[in-house]
Image: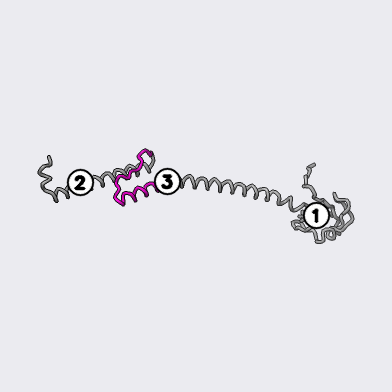
């Protein structure tokens, strides 16, 4: 024979065709009318409040015996699993949010620091300071950008120096006569 385990505070009733409880695990209810006991007709899948607690009914009618079997389960038992799952999901959401925030700060630091450094050096070059150099020891894409930036500033500085020498040679042609080739 199969056994059925019900949650605590569940009630099991057997009622006759008139709704009178003829057997129950709560002996004080035997002899009462099922609808009067709960204050509402007991229909499978419905809920009501009994003894200050919301209850859910599962009923089965046996045509052979002309009896109705009624299982009254506390609604909290039915929803407890959903509540536990919801709490677990909330916990997971919080953990994932914290991981995401940490990742954002790490990625932000990894990307923003080199970009900020490039912008700072570009502003120095913009004001005419071509000695602004970036560290060339990085092995990533920023290292390539840093090396190219340094090469560009050296080339610009070299072109400015050559242009300055040519201008001064044009302005002072006598200096060219004393300068060896």
Occupied quadrant, residue 131: top left
Q: Nearer the viewer, mark 3 or mark 2?
A: 2
- Residue 40 in the image: state x and y as whole percent: 80, 61
Q: Residue at x 80, y 54 (%)?
A: 61
- Residue 170 in the image: state x and y as whole percent: 14, 50
Residue at the limit of the structure toward the right, as seen here: 31
The front one of 35 and 133 is: 133
Occupied quadrant, residue 41: bottom right
Q: Earlier in the sequence, mark 2 or mark 1?
A: 1
Q: Report whether residue 181 is seen.
A: no
The front one of 65 and 177 is: 177
Q: Label 1 to label 3, Cα distance in Å?
A: 74 Å
Q: Is residue 121 above or below residue 43?
A: above
Question: Is 68 situated left or right of 155 in this image?
Answer: right
Q: Nearer the viewer, mark 1 or mark 3?
A: 3
Q: Is residue 27 above or below residue 181?
A: below
The front one of 145 and 153 is: 153
The front one of 181 and 113 is: 181
Q: Nearer the viewer, mark 2 or mark 1?
A: 2
Question: Is 77 situated left or right of 68 in this image?
Answer: left
Q: Residue at x 60, y 46 (%)?
A: 92
Q: Earlier in the sequence, mark 3 or mark 2?
A: 3
Q: Is residue 123 magenta?
A: yes
Give the residue number, with chain letter if any, for mark 2.
162
- Marks 3,2: beta carbons within 8 A: no
Image colouring:
one colour
Q: Which residues are magenta?
A: 116-138
Give the residue number, with chain letter if any, for mark 3.
113
For the residue labelled by badge 1, is the local secondary structure a helix, a strand or a loop? strand
Instruction: Tell me the tag on residue 61.
Output: 1
For the residue labelled by badge 3, is the local secondary structure a helix, a strand or a loop? helix
């Amino acid at each position: 024979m199969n056994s059925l385990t019900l949650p605590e505070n569940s009630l099991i009733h057997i009622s006759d065709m008139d709704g009178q409880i003829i057997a129950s695990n709560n002996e004080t209810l035997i002899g009462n009318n099922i609808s009067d006991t709960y204050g509402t007709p007991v229909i499978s899948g419905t809920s009501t409040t009994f003894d200050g607690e919301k209850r859910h009914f599962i009923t089965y009618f046996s045509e052979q015996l002309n009896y109705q079997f009624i299982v009254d389960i506390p609604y909290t038992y039915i929803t407890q699993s959903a509540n536990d799952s919801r709490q677990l999901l909330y916990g997971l959401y919080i953990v994932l949010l914290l991981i995401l925030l940490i990742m954002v700060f790490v990625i932000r630091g990894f990307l923003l620091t080199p970009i900020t450094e490039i912008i700072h050096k570009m502003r120095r070059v913009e004001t005419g300071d071509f000695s602004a150099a970036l560290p060339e020891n990085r092995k990533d894409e920023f290292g390539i950008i840093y090396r190219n930036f340094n090469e560009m500033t050296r080339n610009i500085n070299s072109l400015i120096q050559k242009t300055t020498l040519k201008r001064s040679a044009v302005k002072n042609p006598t200096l060219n006569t004393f300068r060896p080739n």
